Image (cartoon, rainbow, N blue to C red):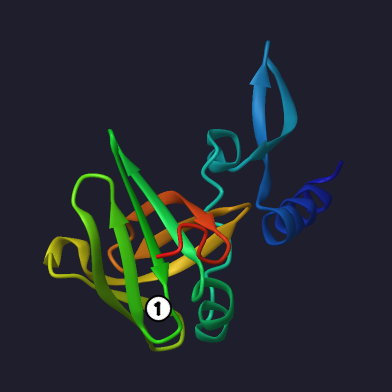
Amino acid sequence: MSRNERTAFRDYLDMKTNLSLIDVVVRGRRVMMLAACASLFCGNLSARAAELTRAELATRVVGNTIHYQSGTEHVFEFLAPDGVIRGYSSVHGTYTARWRLLGADAICFEHEDPMASGCVSVVLRKGLIEYHRRDGVVEGPFAFLAGNPRNL
């Protein structure tokens, strides 16, 4: 493969597949290899997944339940279409909070506890939901349950 062909192929891979060609020296010989981005092999594909738009949040997230688990505590939150979060904690019992859509791609959760409140972008994937905070931190994945299976 000529230098120009390698450069063109490298550019194509970078653009289309998030793969790249790398030169490796093996026993004194130069070898061309494909290398996938590290996240592909580490299992963190969420950085590549599409964050939901406002319209998708309204149709795919609202009206469903999110299950959080921490140690022995289980928390279920149903996001009702009227903006109310109806929740149940196996430690604290039932509670209510609020949700609202913000801008083109964020949902905000407003709880009595400020540490449980904030606005995030959302990624849905195979029965799981992730929250992508504006500071780059990804929370989750959490179980995403269709409808209101706990009758909250």
Residue at the limit of the structure toward the top, as seen here: 27
Tell me if residue 85 can be seen: yes
Q: Is residue 79 above or below residue 32?
A: below
Q: Which residue is mark 1?
A: 106
- Displayed quadrant of residue 1: top right
User: Is residue 85 shown left or right of residue 56?
Assistant: left
User: Is residue 51 shown left or right of residue 73?
Assistant: right
| Along the viewing direction, whichever of 104 and 60 lies nearer the viewer | 60
Q: Quadrant of the C terminus?
A: bottom left
| Along the viewing direction, whichever of 88 and 143 lies nearer the viewer | 88
Residue 99 percent location from the top left of the image:
33, 78
Number of marks drawn: 1
- Displayed quadrant of residue 113: bottom left
Residue 15 percent location from the top left of the image:
69, 61
Residue 138 percent location from the top left of the image:
37, 54
Q: Is residue 59 above or below residue 114?
A: below
Label 1 SS: strand
Residue 12 percent location from the top left of the image:
76, 58
User: Is residue 139 shown left or right of residue 130?
Assistant: left
Residue at image point 72% right, 51% down: 10
